Amino acid sequence: MTTWVALLRGVNVNGVTVKSADLAALFGDLGFDGVRTVLASGNVRFASDVEVDEREGLKTRIEQGLRDRFGYDAWIVLVTLDELRAAADAFPFDAEDPSRQPYVVFCSDRGVLEALTDAAASLDPAEDPASSGFGVLYWSPEKGRTVDTPLAKVLAQSRYRTSTTTRNLRTLAKIVGGSP
């Protein structure tokens, strides 16, 4: 069995409301074991006998289940718990800096990650500190500026919405630890 984490994009914002209990029920109905939702921002930890090389089929199945059950255009980034833990552990900036947000942008498309990495490299690192990792872009914007920095504006482009989602490092710690 593999422990997976589905990171939903756009849940409980912009009129898309999905209750954690309903989300957990869907994953149970899809046949997954050990289902836990973490926070109300669309994080589901679950176990499945689906192998890592079958990830794309699993991702498609979950997205279709979300669309059918909740009636919205659902996209997820699907990672193993080990991949999520490794991404969190490799955060290259000072996660304890009280003036900054420790973010990890998960990408399910390698081309998108390359485009975001290139975009970040062209920006002022003092304003938009960013660094790529395995399947992720690390980002540490100033608190209060997470929607208006140049990189924030790049990340907000609609062409990235189907293959990226951003999580705070504190959220990742809760997912890894399994706390709700």
Image (spheres, rainbow, N blue to C red):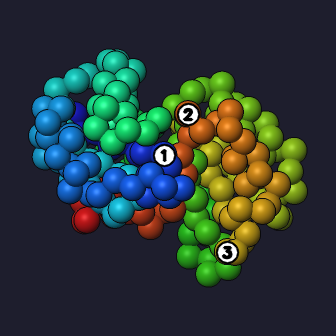
Q: Bin the neighbour count of mark 3 within 10 Å (Cα to Cα): few under 14, some 14-19, many 20 and up.
A: few
Q: Is residue 126 above or below residue 121?
A: below
Nearest to the observer: residue 84 or residue 154 = 154
At horizontal 82% and vertical 64% (from top left) the residue drawn is 127
- Which image quadrant is residue 125 in? bottom right
- Residue 9, numbered label: 1
Nearest to the observer: residue 154 or residue 136 = 154
* Relative to 69, 142 lies left or right: right
* SS for callout 1: loop
At horizontal 55% and vertical 33% (from top left) the residue drawn is 162
Residue position marked by numbered label 3 in the rendering? 143
- Which image quadrant is residue 126 in? bottom right
Instruction: Please provide percent x and percent y for residue 157.
Output: 72, 42
Farthest residue, direction bottom = 98
Disc 2/disc 1 C-alpha distance (Å) = 8 Å
- Residue 162, numbered label: 2
Instruction: Please provide percent x and percent y for residue 26.
Output: 21, 41
Q: Amino acid at mark 2?
A: Thr
At horizontal 16% and vertical 26% (from top left) the residue drawn is 49
Instruction: Please provide percent x and percent y for residue 132.
Output: 65, 43
Instruction: Please provide percent x and percent y for residue 91.
Output: 55, 56
* Relative to 25, 138 lies left or right: right
* SS for callout 3: loop
